[in-house]
Image (tube, grey):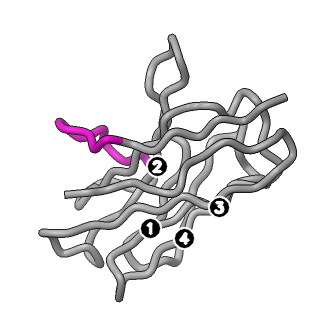
């Protein structure tokens, strides 16, 4: 089970760090990723991090602005978002994948997500 938190309202150019807490699974053996869904758009993959923290992957639109990290001891994964743009406005979801990296498979069931709103 994954639970996202930390979203909020921020002005363009600002920063926000969102978190995802995992329970009920061997967190440290899973690659973790973030997805997002903007209003009226399909959910899209944003970033991922390997189980051993050695590798990360970002889509081009967030590369250089977002940083994914994880703390295996706490079973948490984070997304530090800097230089936010209005087009980053979306509900952000995390996901886990035991077999695939960097392209985390979309899970069958999603968590509640966390809303990130960037005002212009």
The furthest residue to the top:
40
The furthest residue to the left:
24
Q: In which quarter of the image is residue 62?
A: top right
Kindly identify the residue that appears in the image at 24 percent across and 41 percent down.
107
Q: Answer few, some or many: residues within 10 Å of disc 2's Cα (few below 14, many 20 plus, some between 14 and 19).
A: many
What separation in Å lies between label 1 and label 4 (alpha carbons)? 6 Å
| Residue, disc 3 | 80
Q: What element carries label 2?
A: strand
The magenta stretch spans which residues? 103-112
The furthest residue to the front:
9
The answer to whether the residue labelled 1 contacts the one labelled 4, judged by CB atoms less than 8 Å apart, is yes
The answer to whether the residue labelled 3 contacts the one labelled 1, judged by CB atoms less than 8 Å apart, is no
In the figure, is residue 94 to the left or right of 98? right
- Badge number at residue 77: 1
Q: In which quarter of the image is residue 74?
A: bottom left
What separation in Å lies between label 2 and label 1 (alpha carbons)? 9 Å
Residue 106 part of the magenta-drawn span: yes
- Badge number at residue 69: 4
The answer to whether the residue labelled 3 contacts the one labelled 4, judged by CB atoms less than 8 Å apart, is yes
The answer to whether the residue labelled 2 contacts the one labelled 1, judged by CB atoms less than 8 Å apart, is yes
What separation in Å lies between label 3 and label 1 (alpha carbons)? 10 Å
Kindly identify the residue that appears in the image at 44 percent across and 26 percent down.
43
The answer to whether the residue labelled 2 contacts the one labelled 4, judged by CB atoms less than 8 Å apart, is no
Q: Answer few, some or many: residues within 10 Å of disc 1's Cα (few below 14, many 20 plus, some between 14 and 19).
A: many
Q: Quadrant of residue 15?
A: bottom right
Q: Position of residue 100 (x, y in %)?
A: 32, 53
Residue 85 part of the magenta-drawn span: no
């Amino acid at each position: 089970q994954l639970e996202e938190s930390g979203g909020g309202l921020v002005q363009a150019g600002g920063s926000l760090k969102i978190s995802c807490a995992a329970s009920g699974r061997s967190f440290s053996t899973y690659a973790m990723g973030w997805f997002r869904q903007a209003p009226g758009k399909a959910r899209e993959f944003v970033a991922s991090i390997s189980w051993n923290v050695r590798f990360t992957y970002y889509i081009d639109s967030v590369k250089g602005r977002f940083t994914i990290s994880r703390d295996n001891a706490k079973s948490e994964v984070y997304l530090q978002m800097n230089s936010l743009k209005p087009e980053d406005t979306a509900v952000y979801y995390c996901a886990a994948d035991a077999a695939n990296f960097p392209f985390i498979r979309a899970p069958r069931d999603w968590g509640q997500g966390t809303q990130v709103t960037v005002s212009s």
